[in-house]
Amino acid sequence: MGDSRVDPLAIVEKVRHLPGLLAWQSGALGERVVWRTASGQLTISEWHRRAVDFAGRLARAGLREGDVAGLRMGEGIDWVVALFGLWRAGAVVLPLGVGQRWQGARETLDRAGARWLVTGGERPWTGQTRVVVFGTGRRGGLDCCPEGMGPESLALVAPTSGTTGEPKLAMLTHGNLLASAGARASLVGHQPGDRVLSWLPLTHQYALNADVVKGLLAGAQAARLVSPRGILRGLRRWKPTHFQAVPRLYEKVWRLAGGEQATPESLKHFFGGRLRWAGCGGAPLPGWLAEAYARLGLPILEGYGLTEASPLVTMNTPLAYRAGTAGRVVPGMRVEIAGDGEILVRGAGVMRGYHGDPEATGRVLRNGWLHTGDLGSLEDGYLRVTGRKNDLIVLSTGRKVMPARVEAALLALPWVETAVVYGDGEPRVRALVRARAGSRPNWNVGRLEGLEEHEQPARLVPMERELSVELGEVTALGKINRAVVARHFTGG
C-alpha cells in the first residue's frame, strides 16, 4: 500500500469519492509531503486532518449534503484543505477565482443557487449566501462523510470559460473527477522524488485535475507558487520533474533561451535542470514552437480536454507522442469524429449536464455522446484539433473561413507572437498581429502557405499591447475570446 507505484486506476476503483481518496492516501502515504510553498508544507495526513476539522465546522454551521458552496480564496495550501473539507461535509463546490470581480462572483453564486461561500478573510455582501471565513472558528472534525455520498454524487458546478458563448456551470461528479485524474496519473508514471511545479489557477479544471487530484492519487509532491509572475524563478528554485503550462509560457521561455539560437543547455537552465515531462493545454501550441522544442530534445506534450469532460480526453506521453496532435484517447474515454468533423466524446469523465439549463444540456449531450463543438480528425489514433464549429467567419461573398487555420499559418511565421483573425461579413478577413520583441516584422507577407485564396488575410493590423486576462480578451489558460479582442482593438 505504501508503494508509490500502485496503479492509480486501482485506487480509483477502491474509493467512492474524493474525500475517501484523501482518507485512503492518508492511511497509505500519510507522512509524505505533497504540497510545498516558500513558507510551508503539507503532508497527506495533515491535509486529511485539517480537512476533517473544517468539515466539522461547516456541518456545525448547518451545511448539508448537496448544498452548493462557493470557494473564493487564495489558491495555496489552505485552498486545497478548504476544498476537501467542503467535499467531506457533502458540499457541491463552485470554484471562483480571486481575480474575478465581486459583481461577477455574486452573479455566478446566484446562478448556481449557492447557499454558502468560503473565503480567506473577506465578508462581502452576498444576499442569501452565508459566508464562512476559512481558518477561524472552533475546531472539531466530522467523523465520516455523508452516507449517501458516492461516485454519482455531484462534486463541482464548474464554470466554463465562455469564450464561445455564455458561460455555463458543468455538473461534475466525484466519479468524473476521479476517473479523469486516474487516467492522467496512469499515463504520467510518477516515480519517488518527482516534483510538479503548480502555478496555473486551481479553480480551472486543468490544474485541479493535473496538480490536485492526480497529485494526490500518485502521491507526487507539488510546489505551489503564490503568483504566476514568479514562474521563471520558481522553475529554477523548485527544479520540477513535471510541469504543466500554456503555450504563452513556452513561447516566452523559447525567446529567453535564445530563440533560434537556443540550445538544449539553455532550455534546461530555464526549466530548472530536472524536467522529464512538459505538458501543454488550454490552447493549441503553435506548430513551429512544438517542432523547435522537440528538435532540442524537450517535446512539449499536448493534450485535449474541456470542462464538460472533467477535463481530460486525449494526451501525448513520452512513449506515445506525435507533434502537432493532442495525443491518444486516455483510459476510460472514447472519441469519434462526426460526419461534419465535430469531435464527439463519451466516457467516465463526461459531465452530468449543465446546472439549471436542461435546454443547453440537451444540445450537447445526445445518445450518451458529448458534442464538443470542436472540429478535428483522428490520425492513427492521435487526435488533431482544427477549430470550432461555431467559430466560422462568413464573408460577404458567402465563403467561409475557419480563423484557427489562418491564425496557425500566421503563427508559423517566426516574427509573429499572437494572431487573431476577424472579418465576419467583410469581403476578406483581416488579422490582428502582435510581433515578437526584437524581431523584424514583415507586414506585407504576401500569400500564406497552406491557405486557399479566400482564406488569405487582406491586411495585417499591428497589436500594440499584449492581450489582457482582466479585460476578458484571453482566459488564464490562454484561450482567446476573438469577439472581445476584435471589439477592443478595432472598435467594431
Image: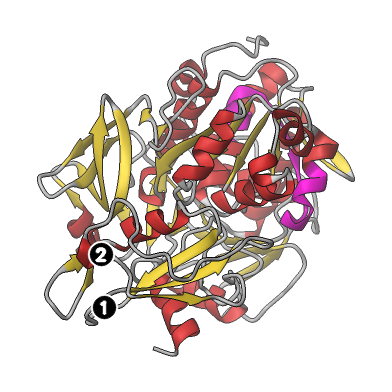
Left or right side of 348 for 79: right
Q: Position of residue 56 (x, y in %)?
A: 68, 47
Residue 194 falls inside the magenta stretch: no
Location of residue 450 in the rendering, given as x and y in whole percent from the top left corner: 29, 51
76, above or below 276, in the image: below
Mark 1 burial class by Cα count in 10 Å: few <14, some 14-19, many 20+? some
Q: Is 188 in front, or is 415?
A: 415
In what quadrant of the picture does the C terminus appear?
A: bottom left
Look at 74% across and 62% down and name the residue there: 120
Instruction: State the residue in front, 391 or 456.
Output: 456
Quadrant position of residue 483: bottom left
Whether residue 261 is situated above or below residue 182 in the rendered picture = below
Which residue is pictured at 77% across the width and 47% down the height?
232
Query: Which SS class for mark 1?
Result: loop
Q: Nearer the viewer, mark 2 or mark 1?
A: 2
Seen from the viewer's position, the closer of residues 55 and 412 is: 412
Q: Earlier in the sequence, mark 2 or mark 1?
A: 1
Amino acid under disc 2: Glu
Report the span colored magenta: 213-234
Q: Which residue is mark 2?
A: 455
Q: Which residue is mark 1?
A: 424
Screen quadrant of the N terminus: top right
Q: CA distance from mark 2 to mark 1?
A: 12 Å
| Residue at 58% from the left image edge and 42% from the top image edge | 88
- Which three-letter amino acid code belongs to the residue tagged 1? Asp
- The verdict on residue 231 being magenta is yes
Question: Is 60 positioned to the left or the right of 246 in the image?
Answer: right
Q: Give the image location of residue 102, x and y in percent.
A: 61, 78
- At numbered mark 2, what does the secondary structure look like: helix, strand or loop? helix
